[in-house]
Amino acid sequence: MEKVAIKNIISAIENFAPPAYQDSWDNSGLLVGDANCIIESALVTIDVTEAVVDEAIVKGCGLIIAHHPVIFSGLKRLTGKSENERVVIKAIKNNIAIYAAHTNIDVVRQGVSWRMAQKLGLDKIQTLIPQKALLKKLVTFVPFDDAVKVRKALFDAGAGHIGNYDMCSFNSTGEGSFRGNDSTNPYKGKKGKLHFENEVRIETVFPAFIQNRIVDTLLTTHPYEEVAYDIYSLENEHQGVGLGIIGSLPEAEDCLAFLKRVKDVFSCQVIRHTPIVSDKIEKIAMVGGAGSSFLKSAIAQKADMFITADFKYHQFFDAENKIVIADIGHYESEQFTKELFYEIVTNKFSKFALRLSEVVTNPINYLF
């Protein structure tokens, strides 16, 4: 079996779900342990409980990969009085690292809600609530003969992605002018002489969190001593980042029959739902985890059903016979996140021993 550094496993996960996309209140990332440790196996879970840590010990796992962080806010003391404290103490004693990817893997394309939609066979899947102000635009001016090289380097660094397209840019030609003083060594022209150069204006977008990488790449590959460039913050919605999904069934289904199918697919003990307002449904909105606050978005996009979790009693009235709310349970909606982690890591490290936890961490039980 393959031995892998914890930091390399983290890198694979965060290339898929960048930590910059987590909510401000969240605490994703490496919570316990040394990222430089080399490990032989890891355990994937939704929650980190004492039973999960015990399972990791028995199975010889040096890392636990979880969806929910075991530490949401700072621990003031480690006395073992709470389960979270005992989890951290036991993990440290047994040299087990704990890593969590929470809201960042919720919001990315192909993330938690997307996996829910795939399980139900939805088509035409789009982000329900795309996030804004996550994109920036780079504009730079490159000598005509160097434009291909610089443009490719920017694409390789992560620029130029719009939806399902990559290598996106706008290019226009023009004439640039400059004059270097006596301390310069111009790539084109001569010092002290006004020079005109045929240049390509390259415009391309990039995620704001990789700005340093984009600028470093530009400065490294651009041939000029002094590189002219502009960076603009954009208010565009980022279609690849946001909460929930909305999609369509291949064919309209009977509403009650579909609810029963949801119950089977997600292994729900029970589904709490509002009255069935239409015999046939087709357009479905979904948010993994607690999604009650996003009901208005589902209604605004004319979804027939909104599948999520953690609705309170009075919030069910907000459906107002415009939509069917289906509360399937928090754990139930996010259970397939383990599959996501497994695919991300094993696609990168095919011979690494990654194990799915056999502990059911759902704290909610039902009496029938």
Image (cartoon, helix red, strand yellow):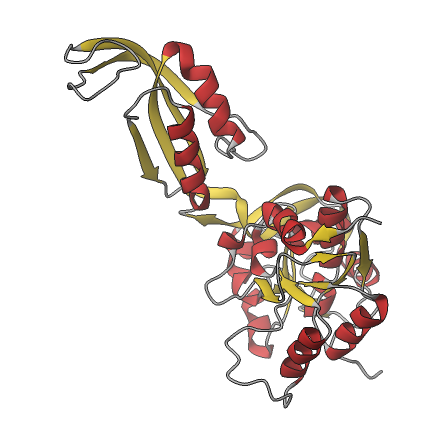
Towards the viewer: 180 or 345? 180
Classify residue 204 as left or right of residue 97: left
Residue 162 in the image: state x and y as whole percent. Answer: 51, 33
Quadrant of residue 240 in the image?
top right
The image quadrant that residue 274 belongs to is bottom right
Q: Nearer the viewer, residue 347 or 264?
A: 347
Q: Up-down: is 27 above or below 234?
A: below
Residue lying at 65% horizontally and 49% vertically, measured from the top left: 8
Q: Can residue 329 be spotted in the picture?
A: no
| Res. 7 in view | yes
Report the side of 43 relative to 228 (left or right): right
Residue 317 lies, in percent from the top left, at: 57, 72
Q: Residue at x 60, y 61 (%)?
A: 102
Position of 14 compared to 50: left or right?
A: left
Residue 266 in percent (x, y) is at: 79, 61
69 lies above or below 124: below
**Residue at image point 70% right, 78% down:** 90
